[in-house]
Image (cartoon, grey):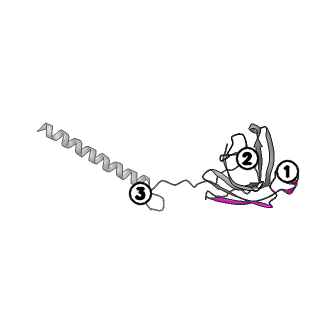
Amino acid sequence: MKKLITPFALAVSLSAALALTGCGATTSNSSSSGSKSSPSAEPTKEVAKAPDLTGTWKQTNSASADSYQAAEITGDVITINWVSNGGDTKSIYWVGTFTAPTDAATPYKWTSTRDKAATEAAMLASQDDTKEFTFQDDTVSYSASALGTTTTVKLKKG
């Protein structure tokens, strides 16, 4: 008979402990207004931050590892160079305005206005007044034209 009472007593003790713990959790979660929050409430979701596009970017879809476009975004300016000779030679392609994203929505698009003073003497610079840029999937892309050929350039940070 003692063997039956011990497991029964243990079960009753555990049930009482769990019941009291449940009551304690409910009381400690109640607010001063009298409303109770459920212990199974969803955790607070973090608000996605706007991406930081400042830094250096390198073309990922160049036909040659030795010749590509590279960009630098600082403050409110984007500068793009044609790069060749393994990085030893750089020629200005674009210097223009940059508008940073204010939220995490993608794709993020902005229109850059060319800095004419910085590009007018550069032989390989775009002569477009504005250029459309898109940021999506950690990639900045835009159209570049030279010698009658237009391509979509894709840049990755780093």
**Residue at 70% over, 56% down:** 142
Q: Residue 15: x percent and y percent? A: 27, 47
Q: Which residue is mark 3?
A: 38
Pointer 2 residue: 69
The magenta segment: 103-132
* Residue farthest toward the left in the current orientation of the protein: 1
Q: Answer with left or right where residue 104 lies relative to residue 45.
A: right
Q: Quadrant of the N terminus?
A: top left
Q: Position of residue 48 (x, y in %)?
A: 58, 54
Q: Residue at x 76, y 43 (%)?
A: 83
**Residue at 31%, 47% in the rendered image:** 18
Disc 3 to disc 2, C-alpha distance: 55 Å
Circle 1: element type: loop
Cα separation between marks 3 and 1: 67 Å
State if disc 1 and disc 2 touch (CB < 8 Å): no
Q: Tell us which disc is closer to us: 3 or 1.
A: 1
Element under label 3? loop
Circle 1 sits on which residue? 123
At label 2, which amino acid type do we have? Answer: Gln
- Amino acid type at circle 1 is Met
Sequence order check, earlier mark of 3 and 1 = 3
Label 2: which secondary element: strand
Camera-nearest label, 2 or 1: 1
- Indicate the quadrant where residue 38 lies: bottom left
Residues at marks 2 and 1, CA–CA distance in whole angstroms: 15 Å
- Pointer 3 and pointer 1: residues touching (CB < 8 Å)? no
